[in-house]
């Protein structure tokens, strides 16, 4: 359930940005995150639509997961697409908090096979 303590939230990012963040230990976000002033995440039940809407056909992506309870109090659940509450992080992400990551292939129609660790 969105906002549930102990759950995971998910981010899709360009692989180059993810790898640079892994090297420095800090992820500051994708260009849209920098423009909006927070890092956009998705809950598990929001992830497929986020991928379809924003990443269809894009190459070299990385999907990663972070525990919700490690981001508080800087994580806010705010209305976004269709009024649903989405997790927004109002600080850079410490990459040591990432618990899962893997490359993500997204088809031209926006479909993607999600890994088993997406709860």
Image: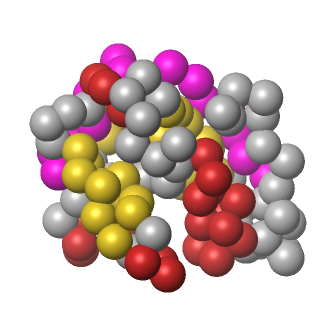
Q: Is residue 23 visible from the viewing direction of this image? A: no
Place of residue 96 in the rendered image (x, y in percent of width and height, measured from the top left) = 35, 18
Place of residue 78 in the rendered image (x, y in percent of width and height, measured from the top left) = 29, 64
Q: Is residue 16 above or below residue 38?
A: above
Q: Residue at x 23, y 52 (%)?
A: 76
State the residue in front, 76 or 112.
Answer: 76
In the drawing, does residue 21 fall left or right of residue 48?
left
Q: Residue at x 49, y 32 (%)?
A: 8
Q: Residue at x 42, y 35 (%)?
A: 4
- Quarter of the image with the C terminus is top right
Q: Residue at x 36, y 53 (%)?
A: 87
Q: Is residue 1 visible from the viewing direction of this image? A: yes
Q: Is residue 85 above or below residue 22?
A: below
| Range covered by the magenta-colored residues | 90-105
Place of residue 102 in the rendered image (x, y in percent of width and height, measured from the top left) = 67, 32
In the drawing, does residue 113 fall left or right of residue 1?
right
Place of residue 20 in the rendered image (x, y in percent of width and height, measured from the top left) = 40, 38
Q: Is residue 45 above or below residue 101?
A: below
């Amino acid at each position: 359930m969105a906002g549930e303590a102990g759950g995971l939230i998910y981010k899709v990012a360009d692989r180059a940005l993810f790898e640079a963040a892994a090297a420095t230990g800090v992820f500051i976000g994708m260009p849209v995150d920098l423009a909006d002033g927070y890092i956009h995440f998705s809950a598990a039940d929001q992830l497929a639509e986020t991928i379809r809407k924003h990443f269809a056909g894009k190459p070299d992506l990385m999907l990663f997961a972070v525990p919700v309870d490690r981001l508080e109090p800087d994580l806010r659940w705010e209305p976004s697409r269709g009024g649903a509450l989405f997790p927004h992080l109002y600080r850079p992400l410490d990459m040591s908090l990432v618990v899962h990551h893997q490359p993500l292939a997204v088809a031209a129609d926006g479909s993607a096979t999600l890994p088993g660790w997406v709860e």
